[in-house]
Image (cartoon, grey):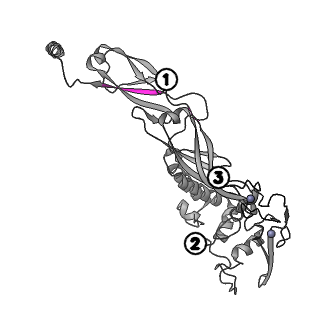
């Protein structure tokens, strides 16, 4: 849950604004994903800096172990106090029964969310379908030029019988009798701090304020049904190993017609025996003979689409790299392509014919 932002930036709690900025710059430089850093660590550093560099947010954080923004984002202060730097501001008040962090229906998150105007958890987020992630392996050339494929997933889909509403066809949705259509159950309690109001999502209607008059017989009123679904996926040209594609709305269906989650496809690219890829550039090797290197020649070599001729000048040394412009991988989401780089190897024959042997001997004598 909540991490100590001071520890993340490696500064003291008493650090000055300058100290914090300096620590941030140093760490952000070290952990930048463009320079091979870990993106989660980088995100964490940025998050810590967002809070500690803003004096208002910093003082909220010092006091409550969390900022109000964060509290609202997380839907209440739940968990924010556990192990956070600021400690629990209400510790030591000696509340009785049902009041601690120990759970029950009336925890600190309820009190704080009502004090700070946060919502314990929005019905929208609670009922949204889950995001799914699956790996997909494609070939080197499919990654380069893009492809279309189909995948089959077992997941919660929208119930077709009730079209996701949860109501039996022909029946309608009625106002939830438990929350009277509010979607929330409000509770008030008298405490030593005065009367405290809290609200929780109604468990009968899951916050929608409506329930089916007759629940759908296919999905028992949930609006979702588990099953297999085949989806067409279009892989863009230029995608690389380890990248993810987001397919909007193809995660799990939400409860009773709530928003659907997304599907993330993580791409694995099978290595190619001939080509190596770095970004949009492709690297490969080509063998030539000693005499071709010495005298110069033109060779034909494979690219990912067709062959090209490369002029090898006389006196070419082993390991020399020739650039073939625009024969790399197409750039992802923009026009143009990378280059191909061909490294020349000089191949020494393992077996010689009689004639070759004679000629090489003569050559040796001349040299
Ligand atoms: Zn249904
Ligand atoms: Zn309700």
Q: Which mark is residue 325?
A: 1
Q: Nearer the viewer, residue 12 or 36?
A: 36
Q: Residue at x 63, y 70 (%)?
A: 79
Measuring from the top left, give residue 59's x and y in whole percent: 68, 66
Query: Where does label 3 land, which residue?
Result: 251
Q: Quadrant for the N terminus, please.
A: bottom right
**Ligand 2 sits in which quadrant?**
bottom right
Label 2 – label 3 distance at C-alpha: 34 Å
The residue wearing badge 2 is: 83
Disc 1 to disc 3, how far (Cα)? 41 Å
Mark 1–mark 2 distance (CA, rounded to whole Å): 56 Å
Residue 297 picture quarter = top left
Closer mark to the observer between disc 1 and disc 2 = 1
Q: Which residues are magenta?
A: 328-345
Q: Earlier in the sequence, mark 1 or mark 3?
A: 3
Name the residue located 81 percent from the left edge and 74 percent from the top edge.
Answer: 186
Above-or-below relation of 56 to 239: below
Q: Position of residue 246 (x, y in %)?
A: 62, 46
Of mark 1 and mark 2, the one earlier in the sequence is: 2
Q: Which mark lies nearer to you, 2 or 3? A: 3
Residue 274 vertical placement versus 2 (above, below): above
Name the foreground residue: 319 vs 260: 260
């Amino acid at each position: 849950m909540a991490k100590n932002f001071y520890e993340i930036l490696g500064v003291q709690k008493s650090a000055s604004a300058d100290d914090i900025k300096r620590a941030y710059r140093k760490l952000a430089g070290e952990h930048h994903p463009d320079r091979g850093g870990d993106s989660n660590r980088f995100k964490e550093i940025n998050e810590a800096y967002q809070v500690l560099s803003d004096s208002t947010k910093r003082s909220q954080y010092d006091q409550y172990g969390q900022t109000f923004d964060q509290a609202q984002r997380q839907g209440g202060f739940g968990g924010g106090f556990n192990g956070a730097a600021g400690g629990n501001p209400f510790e030591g008040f000696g509340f009785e029964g049902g009041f601690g962090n120990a759970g029950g229906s009336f925890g600190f998150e309820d009190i704080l969310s009502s004090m700070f105007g946060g919502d314990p958890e929005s019905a929208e987020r609670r009922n949204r379908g889950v995001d799914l992630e699956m790996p997909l392996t494609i070939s080197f050339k499919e990654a380069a030029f893009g492809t279309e494929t189909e995948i089959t997933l077992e997941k919660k889909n929208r119930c077709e019988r009730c079209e996701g509403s949860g109501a039996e066809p022909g029946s309608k949705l009625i106002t939830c009798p438990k929350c009277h259509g509010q979607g929330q159950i409000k509770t008030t309690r008298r405490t030593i701090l005065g009367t405290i109001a809290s609200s929780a999502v109604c468990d009968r209607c899951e916050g929608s304020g409506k329930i089916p008059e007759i629940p759908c017989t296919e999905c028992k009123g949930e609006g979702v049904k588990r099953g297999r679904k085949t989806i067409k996926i279009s892989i863009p040209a230029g995608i690389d190993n380890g990248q993810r594609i987001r397919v909007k709305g193809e995660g799990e269906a939400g409860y009773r017609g709530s928003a659907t989650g997304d599907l993330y496809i993580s791409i694995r690219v099978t290595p190619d025996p001939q080509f190596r890829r770095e970004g949009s550039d492709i690297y490969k090797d080509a063998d030539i003979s000693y005499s071709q290197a010495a005298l110069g020649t033109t060779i034909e070599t494979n690219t990912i689409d067709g062959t090209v001729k490369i002029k090898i000048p006389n006196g070419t040394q082993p390991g020399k790299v020739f650039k073939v412009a625009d024969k790399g991988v197409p750039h992802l989401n923009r026009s143009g392509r990378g280059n191909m780089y061909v490294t020349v190897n000089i191949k020494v024959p393992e077996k010689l014919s009689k004639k070759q042997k004679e000629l090489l001997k003569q050559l040796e004598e001349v040299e």
